[in-house]
């Protein structure tokens, strides 16, 4: 079977031959743009995957080579552009990451304190508040606990009042926000 015809029909052996003939060349070409060997190999492999998916479009080895050189160049330039953007915005990204991590720590602390305070409530209120924190609505809580919706509302109102007394104003407002 002719190499290109086999490749177009999905013959893996034909693809393997084309890959073995061109892979090293594409890596060398890519190294003009990118200097990380692992990134070069990943990028070139991605180009070959794209080639495989578009194999029906190619009637000649020169078209395959042209496609691969163009793909490698374009993907390399995209990587360079991405790296440039990352370097430009790196200080801001690092700052935002730190802020996000700090907010997560505060939120985890708030959850811990909130659950400790909920444990101090009467058992019925504990169950209701725990289910409410999981996102259940009053109707769902009443069904889950086999109690009336009015009982759920009353118990929540009492629990809110007790939590408001025990929690700092900022923590209580955070609690109400979710």
Image: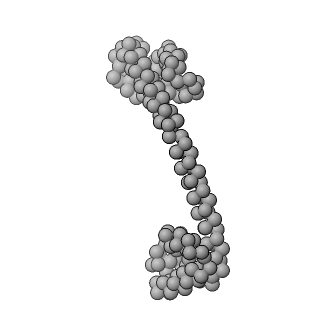
Q: Is residue 10 among what the camera can see? A: no
- Give left or right: position of 44 versus 166: left
Residue 51, how many percent across, how many down?
41, 25
**Rendered image quadrant of residue 159:** bottom right
Choose between 20 and 132: the one closer to the eye: 132
**7, above or below 107, in the image:** above
Choose between 26 and 34: the one closer to the eye: 34
**153, above or below 42, in the image:** below
Residue 152, how many percent across, how many down?
50, 83
Name the residue rendered at 56%, 53% in the picture.
99
**123, above or below 87, in the image:** below
Name the residue rendered at 52%, 35% in the picture.
87
Total number of numbered labels? 0
Choose between 99 and 68: the one closer to the eye: 99
Q: Is residue 77 among what the camera can see? A: yes
**Rendered image quadrant of residue 166:** bottom right
In the picture, which quadrant includes the N terminus?
top left
């Amino acid at each position: 079977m002719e190499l290109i015809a086999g490749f177009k029909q999905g013959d893996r052996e034909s693809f393997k031959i084309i890959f073995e003939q061109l892979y090293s060349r594409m890596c060398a070409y890519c190294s003009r743009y990118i200097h990380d060997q692992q990134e070069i190999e990943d990028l070139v492999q991605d180009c070959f995957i794209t080639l495989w998916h578009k194999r029906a479009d190619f009637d000649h080895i020169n078209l395959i080579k042209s496609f691969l050189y163009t793909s490698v160049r374009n993907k390399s330039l995209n990587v360079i552009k991405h790296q440039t953007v990352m370097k430009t915005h790196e200080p801001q990204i690092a700052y935002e990451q730190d802020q996000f991590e700090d907010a997560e720590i505060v939120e985890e602390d708030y959850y811990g304190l909130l659950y400790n305070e909920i444990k101090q409530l009467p058992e019925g209120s504990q169950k209701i508040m725990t289910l409410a924190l999981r996102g259940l609505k009053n109707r769902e809580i009443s069904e889950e606990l086999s109690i009336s919706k009015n009982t759920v509302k009353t118990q929540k109102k009492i629990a809110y009042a007790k939590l408001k007394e025990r929690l700092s104003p900022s923590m209580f407002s955070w609690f109400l926000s979710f």
